[in-house]
Amino acid sequence: MFARFALFICLMLPMVAQAGQSLHKLLSADEARAWQAVGRINMKDAGFCTGAMIAPNLVLTAAHCVFDPKTGEKLDPARISFLAGWRQGRAAAEGKARRTIVHPDYVHGKSAKVERVAADIAVIELEHPIRNAAIVPFERYRRPNIGDPVKIVSYAKGRAEMPSLEEACEVLGKDPKVLVLSCNVNFGSSGSPIFVMHDGKAKIASVVSAKANYQDNNVALGTSLGQPLEELLAELAKSNGVFKSKKPGRLSLNDQLGRKPATFFTN
């Protein structure tokens, strides 16, 4: 898919721009009830992102959310907390990070390349599981199809005190590890869960990694959660969260596959 057009990609950083126009703020408790397992991830002195629980002690987000945007260093877990169902100054539950687990193929840096987006996922393990009957971790949905409608629940600057829901978007295309979505996301939406409705339930199909432009239209990019998330969880089980990062090769993925490289920009 990426060989056929140029994507202009901009990595999304925590808390730096206004909400998209199609977002609907979840103002009432009734509206927000179904999304209680989505929360704000606070990083002391480094802004905030969005994350979603996939287990009582595991929060899924973007990998770049657990790095300090100023220094580029991985954040000490002691600086990270998760506020489930955060609305107007109150959280349904709060958890402190015990450790952060980044996909082993993720390489942090300023350039926003397709292969980087493909590995831009992380799991925050909490010190103590959140046990609350009203907060149910989300199931995962492995492979959405082109044309599937999706929803995004997120926090960002200008709407940091309550979640917002975007429903009017769909999957435009997919690579084995990256989804292209018509969602109008913006800076500050990093790590937000991308949902597909399946069997009457909202299931996480991806997380927001970057925004891009295709044929003068705003699109969102997300990591497909099939193989990348399974690899991440396997590393968690195998290594107890201690990863040995792989060194990037000299050739890019596009070069290795003989593809025409995409065109990128960074903020």
Image (spheres, rainbow, N blue to C red):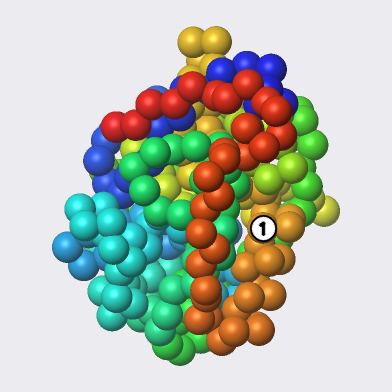
Q: Is residue 251 left or right of residue 77?
A: right
Quadrant of the frame with the N terminus:
top right
Q: Is residue 199 left or right of residue 219?
A: right
Residue 261 location in percent, x, y? 57, 25
- Residue 63 seen in render: yes
**In the rendered view, would you say 259 is above or below 23?**
above
**Quadrant housing residue 98:** bottom left
**In the rendered view, would you say 132 is above or below 266?**
below
Residue type at mark 1 is: Pro
**Quadrant housing residue 18:** top left
- Residue 35 seen in render: no
Which residue is most to the front?
A: 250
Count neighbours of disc 1 (C-alpha within 10 A) and say few if under 14, some if 14 to 19, many if 20 or more: many
Q: Which residue sits at x=28%, y=80%?
A: 78
Residue 116 location in percent, x, y? 52, 46
Q: Is residue 205 left or right of residue 18?
A: right
**Quadrant housing residue 158:** top left
Which residue is most to the right?
A: 199
Quadrant of the frame with the C terminus:
top left
Q: Which residue sits at x=36%, y=48%?
A: 109
Q: Which residue sits at x=29%, y=75%?
A: 76
Q: Secondary structure at mark 1?
A: helix
Which residue is most to the left?
A: 45
Residue 228 location in percent, x, y? 67, 58
- Number of marks: 1
Q: Is residue 165 left or right of residue 54?
A: left
Pointer 1 residue: 228
Residue 235 location in percent, x, y? 63, 75
Of the pair 234 and 198, the residue shown nearer to us: 234
Of the pair 213 and 231, the residue shown nearer to us: 231
Of the pair 174 and 83, the residue shown nearer to us: 174
Q: Which residue sits at x=57%, y=39%?
A: 252
